[in-house]
Amino acid sequence: MALGPRLDLRQSQSLVMTPQLQQAIKLLTLSNLEVEAFIGEALDANPLLDIAETGDAATPPTEPGEPDLRRTHLESSPVDQLVGEGRAADDRPLDIDPATLDRDRDTGDGERLAPTDSGDWSAGGAGGDGEGPGIDDHGAAAASLAEHLHAQIGATTRDAQALFVARWLIDQLDEAGYLVQPLAEAAAMLGVPIATVEAALALVQALDPTGVGARTLGECLALQAREADRYDPCMARLLDNLDLLARGELARLRRMCGVDDEDFRDMLAELRGYDPKPGLRYGSGAGEAVVPDILVREAVQEDGSSGWDIAINQATLPRLIVNRSYYVEMRGACVSKDARAWLGERLADANWLLKALDQRQKTILKVAAEVVRQQDGFFRQGVSHLRPLTLRAVAEVVGLHESTISRVTSNKYLHCARGTYELKYFFTSGVASSDGEGAVSAEAVKASIRQLIDAEDPKAVLSDDTLVDLLRDRGFDLARRTVAKYREAIGLGSSVQRRRQKALAGTR
């Protein structure tokens, strides 16, 4: 067999992640607000892109008779095929492994966005009724706690060293307003006497909101008691023994304070009026507002039946157009071949971006429409009718890869009459029903546990074993450890903890 060089021609197929395909996949992962920022960067980089004004007759790029692309009507396009064909083995989700959604999602991931009451002193949540907010309805992000304190500290002293140390301490506060850095370590790091650090801390603790700069819960509440002129020896002993209050040893604590039942109730009522985490009133950074990407409204179909109108929230998406008149003007002014080539590349990039944004919109609507169809019971009757749903189930119906569904549900929020929810909220694991006829959503089980505990008698607090029996009567077949896991996931304590909390509430 002779050995020598030769020329062979072979033909093969492979999936190539072109820059355009990468851009389309990236756009799928972004939320509407992130897409708005992306569009802003594209406008700066491409002179042929422009923002269409509302009502501009020259802006629509669609043909006569083409349906509104904001709705759920879908049509194929080259970009549809590119994204739909991205099914290589290494085409993994950028944010979530689909297998984790197919397994247990009961640890609180994707809970309803409305905050809930999580403690004796925490604030309650807000409702979610009404129309979806637009981008213009939100102002600038709220000032952070550090910014709020830095704006005040300059007027408290003219001592440059104390002011420097106080500003350093402000930067060490956590989001709740507590100082976790020991004063001795702070003095060693700054190279100043500890007395200087203590004086600077006193300046910080004198700022608004009252209670910031505290090192313990007792110190935080004591600062607020002094502000309210309620810090007497009895209140001091109460704050020094908060561990007894947490354990529910009220009789022992009352004896230690040396007060009668009426005064003790007044002290506890005063204590409940204080804020244990004063720093949480202020923003921790930029952009805390949640703006929905998808709007779902009940609508009457042509046959008279009740259906759903699903639309993209256009208030957060500026409409892009290609300024073709400017392109013609620029092309006429281009003399060199390189300039014409550069202008042609900009036109191609602009056209591709418009197609990618159009495809993103269609894909999100396609997935949202299927989610709404699968979870129709939730939208009509509430969380108790939420069904188990996986990425794979949606992917098979809409004809896309699981990784594409994962990208679509990442950072996307849906607004309906029941509130604003992350799309991931609707993907939950299933729990076997006691009658053997299919499975029910884990979220429905959590809702039932919350209903039972909210309705329990303070004198007969339900144990986990009792909850198992009551849930079985409702058609949920669960083990005791599963009930305990769901109860902890929704922020409810054990029967012992709840009994103590109800005993404290009874002293009001």
Image (spheres, rainbow, N blue to C red):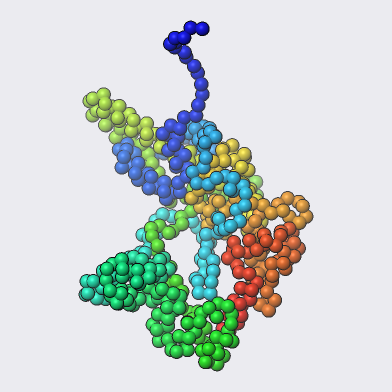
| Image quarter of the C terminus | bottom right
Residue visible at 52% across and 69% down in the picture: 124
Q: Is residue 62 left or right of residue 207?
A: right
Q: Is residue 120 left or right of residue 330?
A: right
Q: Is residue 508 left or right of residue 431?
A: left
The vertical placement of 29 against 63, above or below, is below
Task: State the residue in front, 12 or 181.
Answer: 181
Task: State the residue in front, 488 or 417.
Answer: 488
Residue farthest right in this picture? 435
Q: Is residue 38 left or right of residue 383?
A: left
Residue 318, percent across and down? 39, 46
Task: State the residue in front, 124 or 309.
Answer: 124
The vertical placement of 185 against 335, above or below, is below
Count of residue discs: 0
Q: Is residue 135 visible?
A: yes
Residue visible at 44% across and 36% down in the picture: 22
Q: Is residue 65 visible?
A: no
Residue 85, percent across and down? 53, 32
Q: In which image quadrant can residue 406 be found?
A: top right
Residue visible at 58% across and 84% down in the picture: 250
Q: In which image quadrant can residue 229 be found?
A: bottom left
The vertical placement of 199 against 445, above or below, is below
Residue 101, percent across and down? 59, 48
Task: State the residue in front, 415 or 10.
Answer: 10
Residue 310, percent across and down? 54, 48
Residue visible at 42% across and 86% down in the picture: 231
